[in-house]
Image (cartoon, grey):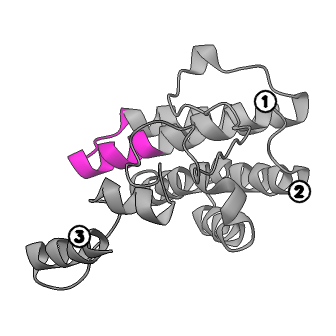
């Protein structure tokens, strides 16, 4: 019994605060039965490790290359044509460094949107709203396009945030640089 009484006292006096954890003292881990939890880096098979396996979707890269865009359903073709055309138009006007960054973000948004459309990853109702937004952009009705984009942000942000922000930048740039 004398040995057990001196061990905690020795450990407590080392820190001076009275708190001792088995994380830094394997002998305490052994004593209290939480062996294997004292070093989280010894491997994944240790007791107490939660194994979480999720089936992750393939990542959607945000690089816009109009020549490499996957085939879209015919009803989504106007979305592709309108957005790629808009990005091309914006690339020809004088852009400040901030504008160029926004255009780059916009192109990423287009790339992600088109890839997700080609995979059937976008809700048909959302795709219909995007088609209306692109139609408004084509008619230089930037207020309507912005309103549709804001509506999508408010209703469908969680599932579509990966491209909605980029599209917002495109609308802002279009309003600033292409409005007559």
The percent coordinates of residue 70 (x first, y second) are 72, 20
Give me the disc on residue 118: 1
Q: Tell me the element at label 3.
A: helix
Residue drawn where x is 69% and y is 38% of the image: 56
Residue at image position (74%, 37%) is 55
Q: Is residue 93 left or right of residue 141?
A: left
Q: Which residues are magenta?
A: 92-105
Residue labelled with disc 2: 125
Q: Quadrant of the N terminus?
A: bottom left
The foreground one among 41 and 115 is: 41
> Magenta includes 93?
yes
* Location of residue 92 in the rendering, given as x and y in whole percent from the top left corner: 38, 33
The quarter of the displayed image where residue 17 is located: bottom left
| Residue occupied by mark 3 | 7
Q: Is residue 34 magenta?
A: no
**What's the mark number on residue 146?**
none
| Residue 73 in view of the camera | yes
Compute the Cα span from label 1 to label 2. 15 Å
Towards the viewer: 66 or 108? 108
């Amino acid at each position: 019994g004398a040995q057990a009484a001196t061990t905690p006292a020795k450990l407590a006096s080392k820190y001076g605060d009275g708190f001792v954890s088995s994380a830094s003292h394997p002998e305490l881990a052994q004593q209290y039965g939480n062996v294997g939890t004292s070093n989280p880096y010894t491997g994944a098979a240790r007791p107490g490790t939660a194994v979480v396996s999720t089936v992750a979707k393939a990542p959607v890269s945000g690089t816009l290359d109009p020549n490499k865009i996957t085939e879209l359903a015919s009803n989504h073709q106007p979305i592709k044509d309108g957005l790629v055309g808009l990005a091309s138009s914006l690339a020809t006007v004088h852009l400040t460094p901030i504008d160029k960054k926004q255009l780059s973000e916009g192109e990423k948004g287009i790339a992600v949107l088109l890839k997700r459309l080609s995979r059937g990853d976008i809700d048909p109702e959302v795709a219909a709203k995007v088609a209306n937004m692109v139609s408004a952009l084509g008619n230089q009705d930037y207020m309507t396009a912005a309103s549709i984009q804001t509506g999508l942000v408010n209703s469908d942000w969680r599932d579509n945030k990966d491209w909605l922000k980029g599209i917002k930048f495109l609308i802002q740039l279009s309003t600033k640089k292409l409005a007559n």
